[in-house]
Image (tube, grey):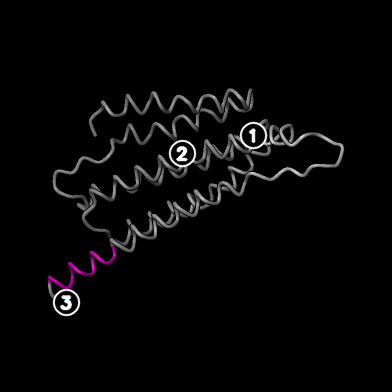
Amino acid sequence: MSARDTSGVRRFDYDRTVALSDGVFAIALTLLVLNISVPRLVPGGETLWHALAGNAGEVLSYAVSFAVIALFWTRHHSFFRVTRRVDGRLLALNLLYLGIVAFLPFPTRLLGLYGDRPEAVAVYAVTISLVSAVAIAMRVHARSAGLLEPGALPDSIWRLASVPLVFLVSIPIAFVSPTAAELSWLSIAGLERVGRRRPP
């Protein structure tokens, strides 16, 4: 196979990887809304507004997961923007990453229904941490295997590690107070700012 043909195959592999990734993210984001159930009213019972208020937990879990998946997609997009080619290991890691992203609607549903239980918070936190860990592994491999564009500066490991750090720390907090654990996730915004100032 000529150098030109090899370059074409690499471009094809890269394009298919990015297209599949965007498709999985789009489906995962869409499935989140299906976790919000439509309330059923009983004649002479509660009003629709009161019934909708009972779905607050599901709506909140949707909002949290949408924001988290959007953050993952943004970072994934930025990473592949500076990736010039893919190899077998990166493809395998990316598939594992997408598999966990596609799984996210399930722990989101658990969180929406049982957000006051530590087990639901723990399952959600572990899932988010696994996605982040695989994302870090992808970047470490791409850098060591020379898959990045020359001079490319991907997200720093510190910045990437901020998400699993926050969610893992929230697990023991959840067994004391699930609400406090969920509120601790807001600290990601502050850690993001710190991460931008650190070298890659």
* Circle on res. 1: 3
The residue lying at 42 percent from left, 51 percent from top is 97
Image: magenta residue range: 3-13
Identify the element where label 3 is drawn: loop
| Residue holding disc 1 | 57
Residue type, mark 1 in image: Gly
As measured in the structure, the alpha-carbon distance from the residue carrying label 2 to the one carrying label 3 is 42 Å
Label 1: few (<14), some (14–19) or many (≥20) C-alpha neighbours in 10 Å: some
Does label 2 or label 1 sit earlier along the sequence? 1
Q: Is residue 42 left or right of residue 32?
A: right
Residue to which mark 2 is pinned: 68
Dot 2: what SS? Answer: helix
Q: Residues within 10 Å of mark 3 (few under 14, many from 20)?
A: few
Which of the two discs, 2 and 1, sits closer to the camera?
1
Image location (x, y in percent) of residue 112: 64, 38
- Asked if the stretch drawn in magenta spans residue 34, the answer is no
Residue, x 28% and y 35% (percent of image)?
156
